[in-house]
Amino acid sequence: MLKATPPNPNPHTPDSQGRFGSFGGRFVSETLMPLLIDLEHAWQQAKDDPSFWQAFDAYARDYIGRPSPLYHAAALESHLRTHKAFKGILYFKREDLNHTGAHKINNCLGQVLLAKRMGKTRIIAETGAGQHGVATATVCARFSLPCTIYMGATDIQRQAPNVQRMACLNANIHAVDAGTATLKDALNEALRDWVQHVDDTFYIIGSVAGPHPYPMLVRDLQAIIGKETAQQLQDKGHAHPHYLIACVGGGSNAIGLFHPFLADTRVRMVGVEAAGRNTTDGNHAAALTLGAPGVLHGSYSYLLQNEDGQIQPVHSVAAGLDYPGVGPEHAFLKDTARVDYQCVNDQQALAALRLTAQKEGIISALETAHALAYVIDNAETFEKDAVIVINLSGRGDKDMQTLAEYP
Ligand SMILES: Cc1ncc(COP(=O)(O)O)c(C=O)c1O
């Protein structure tokens, strides 16, 4: 069936089936289809309604604290100049300074406003690192909506601080023991809940994954990161960035930074996946670098699967990267070579987190540390005066327990 329909020729806007090139789509049961179509229509209307964006912008400013700063990481830059022959100019886009400590809140704010507009009275979400769960619980508290967060039992253990935050925000946390008890299993359970509560429930997906329209909806909301970056670079006297670097789990912080720049061929982009313990099966989460196309959670994209199409177990020290798939727009950007996808292992990420903390006084999330590690470990390859923006997707308070386990 996938081969029979020609790929979407204008892939930066998904076609009527939600495809970026050949990737994406809506591979779901008949029960879910009307919900997704409703959501797509609601988003099309909201997106064209200035009052939606007025409300979004007001909360983004006063509640989230946007715009997030574009910070010149002069201390790390100077360290890399001295020790690694680095010649570039290094900026951090400080999504860690958002309310709740990561980029995830941008998307949750937009989706909760959409849920209100659609008259939905109950919210569900999945979470891995707990950042999306916390962000969802936060907007639900603010907008007086009950919420249930699905989280794998393994993640509940390694991200305890975020579990406590969700509980404090009055979220109902549903532990998922199925499979590897991580993000993919939480997403399965959330989809199951949605099918059973079609009338009143809105599902806030936390990344650019899942069936159409989620990859487009989440991207449209996260694109605020790239739009602000473009303006902030101009204000600092840079016509454009030379490199944009972001970690990739499902891919939302990366696409949020990249998307407004995709048409500008002067801008090179690197998405950094988790190479985990090593690159053998079951030990990493590098779906784009080491996977093959297939269908997961209603979308056709790169996946980690075995020869029979069974989803492989995945591992990353960063819970938010521990996902066997990736958003379909990234699959398209990989195949068209518009974005370069690389991977970084656990040890590299841990070392980058520590170096950045020691030089800049910024403790990043372990997810983010993959992007930092790519730049630190390839510092000598950047041209003189290249303007490099790393998306500082989140802060690392949640990761202190994991850090202690890897002295
Ligand atoms: C701080 C942080 N960065 C990155 C990610 C990865 O998600 P995505 O690839 O959707 O940005 C997560 C996921 O939980 C996260 O918490």
Image: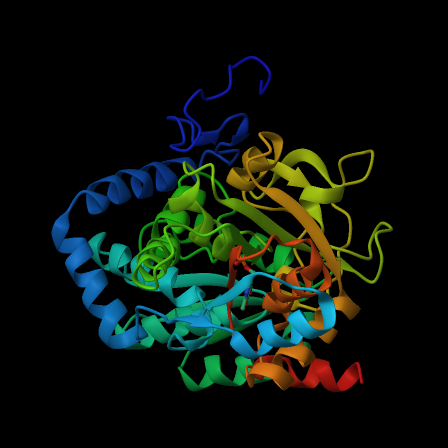
Q: Residue at x 56, y 12 (%)?
A: 4
Q: Is residue 107 left or right of residue 343?
A: left
Q: Residue at x 82, y 57 (%)?
A: 283
Q: Is residue 1 visible?
A: yes
The image shows residue 307 at horizontal and vertical percentages of 83, 34
Quarter of the image for the C terminus: give it: bottom right
Give how far across and how far down residue 194 sits, in percent: 44, 52
Query: In terms of image quadrants, where is residue 141?
Result: bottom left
- The mark tally for this picture is 0
- Name the one closer to the observer, 27 or 246: 246
What quarter of the picture does the N terminus occupy? top right
The extreme left residue here reads 51
Q: Is residue 30 above or below residue 75?
A: above
Camera-nearest residue between 5 and 395: 395
Query: Quick check: 370 left or right of 4?
Result: right
Above or below residue 320? Residue 364 is: below
Task: Name the one closer to the observer, 253 or 321.
Answer: 253
Ligand 1 shows up in which quadrant of the image? bottom right
- The picture places residue 67, in percent across and down from the top left corner, at 31, 68
* Residue 304 visible in the shown view: no
Seen in the image, is 14 located left or right of residue 340?
left
Q: Residue at x 43, y 53 (%)?
A: 256
Q: Is residue 171 above or below residue 37?
A: below
Tell me residue 291's x, y (percent).
73, 40
